Amino acid sequence: MKKRSKRYQRVAQLIEKREYTVDEAVELVKKTASAKFDESVEIAVRLGVDPRKADQAVRGTVTLPHGLGKEVRVLVIAKGEKAEEAKEAGADYVGYEDYIEKIQKEGWLDFDVVVATPDAMKDLGRLGRILGPRGLMPNPKSGTVTMNVKETVKEIKAGKIDFRVDKTGIIHTSVGKCSFEKDKLKDNIKTLIQTIISLKPASAKGVYLRSIHISSTMGPGIKMVTNTQEYQD
């Protein structure tokens, strides 16, 4: 069994074995964030789906109204006019063969999101073994394979995130920083949950939202209510 630090054990005592409302959970996650850095607020949503079935592999994107509280480094693989659009939109890195080779030969991965034009995918394919396992391969379903490069880069910089259910049926992502005001964290959480609810597969049977937990990066999990009404505006 993993040994927990005294700090962790101390803040864990603040959490009761019950489900908390969004208001209560946000207030509590801020109290339990006791590390010496600005911890992220992580959320784990367990769904009543079978990820092995293609029509139940829940995946989507959402623009969090208050962003993630951190700089997202965007790499754009494009040429000509689309490359220029990416630069104007604020992409951190823009190029084509130079960056593909840098990733392939040097193992360079100093970016968080890759955006590519459709014509670039034939060359990016050879990076599948490097980018795929890290969730960095551009995908039309997440909107990162697009001709609308300018708008996509702006959305990502503004807080657009890509999420997907893992093989255990859980969606895990960040929804901001512990230093955020309570209302901003609540807005981000509700926006994400509303989006996940809207993506419920027609073939999914039984309870869809099985459990929802939030925590700070170094803190204990806080169980939240799964009543969908709680996450409506």
Image: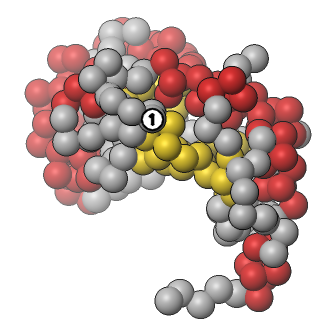
Question: Front-most of 88 and 176?
Answer: 176
Q: Secondary structure at mark 1?
A: loop
| Quadrant assignment, res 128 | top left
Task: Residue at 19%, 42% (x, y): give it.
Answer: 52
Q: Position of residue 50 (x, y in %)?
A: 27, 40
Q: Is residue 150 above or below residue 36?
A: above
Residue type, numbered disc 1:
Val
Task: Residue at 42%, 47% (x, y): give it.
Answer: 170
Q: Is residue 228 left or right of residue 103?
A: right
Task: Residue at 28%, 59% (x, y): give it.
Answer: 107
| Quadrant assignment, res 184 | top right
**Residue that label 1 marks:** 207
Q: Is residue 214 above or below residue 47?
A: below
Whether residue 91 is visible: no
Q: Position of residue 6 (x, y in %)?
A: 77, 88
Q: How many marks?
A: 1
Q: Is residue 64 above or below residue 154?
A: below
Q: Position of residue 134 (x, y in %)?
A: 33, 52
